[in-house]
Image (tube, rainbow, N blue to C red):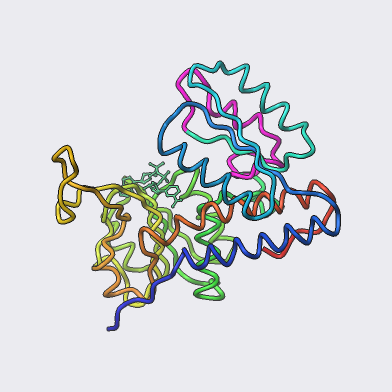
Amino acid sequence: MSEAAVIDGKAFSARLREKVASEVSRIKSESSVTPGLAVVLVGDDPASRVYVGSKAKQTVEAGMESFEHRYNDDIDEATLLDLIDQLNNDKTVNGILVQLPLPDQIDEQKVLSAIDPDKDVDGFHTTNVGRLWTGGESLVPCTPFGCSLMLKDYLGNLSGKNAIIIGRSNIVGKPMAALLLAESCTVTIAHSRTDDLPGKCREADIVVAAVGRPEMVKGDWIKPGATVIDVGINRVDAPEKGLKDDGSPKTKLVGDVDYAGAAAVAGAITPVPGGVGPMTIACLLRNTVVACCRQNGLPDPDL
Ligand code: NAD
């Protein structure tokens, strides 16, 4: 059997960002509205700083307004809730994203619930979760939405396909299941207590791995010709790359799937890095434009 096709998330996300930018320029010229995204960052976690920086940069590159709100990690909950209230009432802000995790003194769920569901571009508010599962007009979490776009682009009609999602988090696994169910897949949600996970995987036409365990899904778990979407991002030691200045091994990113083993069997697979990862911010920009259109009584953009 030949090597799997590579589903190139970097190229796909670049095309989506271009489409977002052209929708933004159309909206600006037709309605004089500029979509705006507010990102709230608490503390100085280096990974969160990098994510927020990339989000702001790509927001501006797409022609939108970016508003950044940075706080020290000793901020109290009331101050953060006040900010959310201001952003909810600010007409120039169409999307609000609170970068997680938040420090211990702040109730994350309380903050996420305070966001106006129509501005909840992360799609984590229970109102959007409910709308997603009941087929309503929702804002959908960015990472699983990006996975579903890539699957539909690569496979076309997903109806009737057997899909297994490994992982049941609120951020990835559960919304992914809702999206694939809406596409009329037969969906299995697997997790840490699932019995005979390899056997269940082997029945699937579509495998979505969202576990957070490096290279857990092996090639012999994959049905020949299946499509594999690897959401995992895991940093592991890579002694083959040599040593850092402090004598410790250099590192690399790997997914939840043993790429070489799975690529030898699958029909198509997303790489890590360069697969699902780049789609997440592109979908955040897309959600912001969708939110802006809905808030201004404009038709949903074709994104
Ligand atoms: P999580 O820790 O919230 O959930 C992991 C899930 O995996 C849990 O539901 C758990 O039941 C399941 N699990 C754990 N061990 C298992 C096992 N041995 N067998 C089967 N299932 C098992 O993680 P998450 O937030 O859903 O993220 C999952 C992975 O996706 C992580 O590597 C994360 O970094 C990555 N991620 C990537 C993006 C992106 O933009 N590409 C976005 C979000 C998360």
**Left or right, residue 44 beside residue 194:** right
Is residue 40 inside the magenta stretch? no
Question: Would residue 126 be counted in the magenta stretch?
Answer: yes
Left or right: residue 85 compared with residue 32: left
Q: Quadrant of residue 67?
A: top right
Q: Position of residue 8 (x, y in %)?
A: 44, 68
Q: In this rendering, would 97 be left or right of 252?
A: right
Q: Nearer the viewer, residue 266 or 101?
A: 101
The residue under the point 18% across, 55% down is: 241
> Quadrant of the image for the C terminus?
bottom right
Q: Is residue 131 above or below residue 72?
A: below
Measured as percent of width and height from the top left, residue 78 is found at: 62, 16
Looking at the image, is 75 positioned above or below residue 151? above
Magenta segment boundaries in residue numbering: 101-128
What residue do we see at 29% from left, 47% from top?
Answer: 235
Front residue of this view, candidates 223 and 116: 116
Write down the quadrant of residue 130 in the picture: top right
The quadrant of the rendering that contains the N terminus is bottom left
Q: Residue at x 41, y 61 (%)?
A: 274
